[in-house]
Amino acid sequence: MPAQETRPTDVRSPDGTRLSVTTRGTAHTPLVVLVHGMGMSTSSWGEVPERLAGSCRVVTYGLRGHGDSDPARDGSYGLDAHAADLAAVLAAVRTDGEPVTALAHSFGGAIVLRYVARDGDDALSGIVFAGSGASAVTVPGVPAARGAGLLARVLRGCWLGVAGAAFVLARRLRRWPRLTDRLTRWYAVAPGAPEHQVALVRRDFLATRPRAMVRTVLASLGNDGQQPAPEVSAPVTVVHGSHDREVSRADAERLVERTPRAELVEVPDGSHMLPLTHPDVVVGAVLALVRRTAGPHPADA
């Protein structure tokens, strides 16, 4: 098999935002595009890209305002803007209309489904949701903020202030690593996870630009990210960790029920950061879909 290549490049979204894109693998192998979660970067995929690159062409990119990608050129961080970014990445990396298997983590699932709602799923041969219920961010009582009236504007303004203050506080907590370590372990990874995984999640979250983080949360409040699920005709695998504090089993089951060709894979003791903590399961789910939709590739051996 030809040697694997790693090719960093840039893609411009329709509003001019520069997105940092990296392609791994070799030509003429199945294409897999990875969409990471809110407050994370491409580092949050851990070993998954390298493992997939043994038999696939793997594309990772940073969401606008995250990681090495630039802040939004037009200031927009809504789901439509993120979906337009994904469309721009797919247009840049696909060859002759080849099919794509999408792997989405956390908020990345909502981005993939909004892309389907905007552009259809003709480009997608399969989707794996890992640690993702594809729901946009919601909090009790806030869905009313979807409207355009005075109350909705007040609620959005209040939430923006609270979320901004909370994020600033979280950044200041870097001075107390023991506290941030416990919070990260409780929320995102398993209690016994190695320190380097905890440090990666903590570093990614605290390095995300505050404006990008807060406005992405704000723009997604009250949206039903799963709404486009019935429009997905491609096969779907939902990989859910039994100890995921962000995505409930009910959310995962609801996504499976709303998607015509979906199955649920439960990971005992799995946390929210499945690609980082359980790469074998995630890689296996992606390759199973690739083989199912594109047939086995000699490199799989």
Image (cartoon, helix red, strand yellow):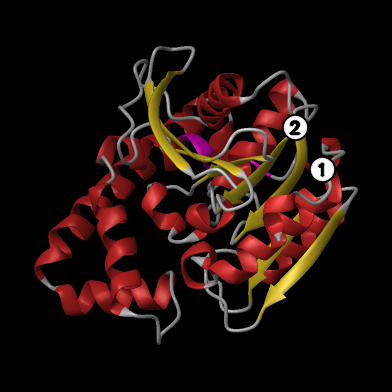
Residue, disc 2: 99
Circle 1: element type: helix
Q: Residue 87, position in %: x, y?
A: 60, 23
Q: Residue 61, position in %: x, y?
A: 45, 37
Q: Earlier in the sequence, mark 2 or mark 1?
A: 2
The residue positioned 60% from the left and 33% from the top of the image is 27
Q: Is residue 297 left or right of residue 137?
A: right
Q: Quadrant of residue 177?
A: bottom left
Q: Which residues are magenta?
A: 219-225
Q: Residue 11, position in %: x, y?
A: 43, 21
Q: Quadrant of residue 31?
A: top right
**Number of the label disc, if any, that sits on residue 294:** 1
Residue sticking out furthest to the left: 175
User: Main structural element of the magenta stretch: helix, strand or loop?
Assistant: loop
Can you see residue 28? yes
Label 2–label 1 contact, CB within 8 A = yes
Camera-side residue: 264 or 297? Answer: 297
Q: Residue 255, position in %: x, y?
A: 76, 55
**Number of the label disc, if any, that sits on residue 116:** none
Q: Quadrant of the C terminus?
A: bottom right
Is residue 223 found inside the magenta-colored segment of the image? yes
The residue positioned 54% from the left and 51% from the top of the image is 138
Q: Inspect the image, locate mark 1, and give the three-letter code of the amino acid beneath it.
A: Ala
Vertically, is 171 above or below 210? below
